[in-house]
Amino acid sequence: MSRPSARFARLGLLASLLLPLAGTGCAALDALGLQKPTARLSGVRLQDISLTSITMLFDVDLSNPYAVDLPLVNVDYGLASGDKPFLSGKADLQGAVPAKGTRRLSLPTTVTFQQLLSVLSSVKLGSVVPYRAELGLSVNAPVLGMLRLPMQKEGQLPVPAPPEVKVQEIRWGKLSLDSAGGVVRLHMVNRNQFPVNMARLAYGLTLGKTEVAKAAIDKPLAFEANGGAGVVEIPISFSPRKLGLAVLGMLTGEGASYKLTGDVAVQTPFGPMSLPVEGVGKTVFRK
């Protein structure tokens, strides 16, 4: 038999062995002692964390042992906490893993906290939720056809809560018709089960029915988990004359109702977050 004929005969024999196993996936490759593609979930990154949702990026490393490109087909995924699944889905994939090469994929999915809390009734705002992720990445392997490569990963998801805020007092250093200046003592409490480090606070302060300040300050301050508290001192300065004479009368009294709104930029073990702040009540004036 000539060499080309012998080669074709060997290919025919291999095909006759593989074809009955087509569609059985990795088990077929194991049975023949052949290499198979691999998928490894190398990490999970959390992005765009807000009070309503969080984006999870699954980093998957793929390896192709074949001498031809390995086309990607789709990915299926499921997320559960304990025995309660709270998210599942499937998405088509484009492209291929190069021959005898590797490729990293970043696969995003978004978890909405409304959906999460509806399934996990014991979870509250501020909680840290353990999760288990199960993914299956499907590829179109030569001869065998569709192969599903399973992966698992465990981790934690934050369900952030905004801080509690209260204006303890306003201490005036200067108070006249043309100029009012002082310091607002703002008491803040972290309601999350994880620590936060404040970096920046943007705020608007209304006394009575008049907005007297709107600004932002860079203020590093660490808050421990589960009720860690701290005091932020905010300098304010404005002209009562421009806001109306009634404002000066209010400021020379013993106190006033207030409303404070804004947002706080924080660093957490899960990444950066921007949390809204809002507080209403009655504060006292000091001189």
Image: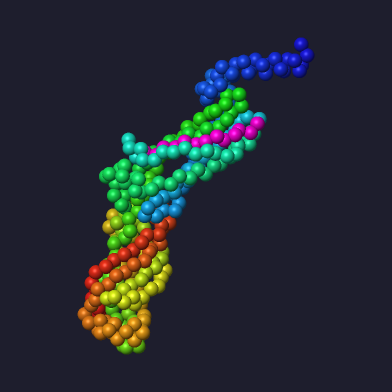
Q: Of all residues shown, which one is farthest toward the left? A: 254
The relative height of residue 172 versus residue 189 in the rendered view (above or below) is below
**What is the number of callouts on the image?**
0
**In the displayed structure image, the side of residue 6 where residue 88 appears, left or right:** left
Residue 179 is one of the magenta-drawn residues: no
Segment tinted magenta in the rendering: 68-80
Image quadrant where residue 98 sits: top right
| Residue at the spot 36% in from the left edge and 66% down from the top edge | 262
The relative height of residue 241 versus residue 274 in the rendered view (above or below) is below
Q: Of all residues shown, which one is farthest toward the top? A: 1
Residue 75 is one of the magenta-drawn residues: yes
Residue 87 appears anywhere in the view: yes
| Residue at the spot 23% in from the left edge and 72% down from the top edge | 282
Q: How is the image coloured?
A: rainbow
The quadrant of the image that shows the N terminus is top right
The quadrant of the image that shows the C terminus is bottom left
| Residue at the spot 27% in from the left edge and 44% down from the top edge | 121
Main secondary structure found in the magenta portion: strand
**In the displayed structure image, the side of residue 107 where residue 141 appears, left or right:** right
Residue 220 appears anywhere in the view: no
Q: Position of residue 232 (x, y in %)?
A: 33, 69
**In the displayed structure image, the side of residue 280 where residue 88 appears, left or right:** right
Q: Position of residue 169 (x, y in %)?
A: 26, 74
Q: Of all residues shown, which one is farthest toward the bottom? A: 177
| Residue at the spot 60% in from the left edge and 39% down from the top edge | 95
The relative height of residue 271 versus residue 167 in the rendered view (above or below) is above
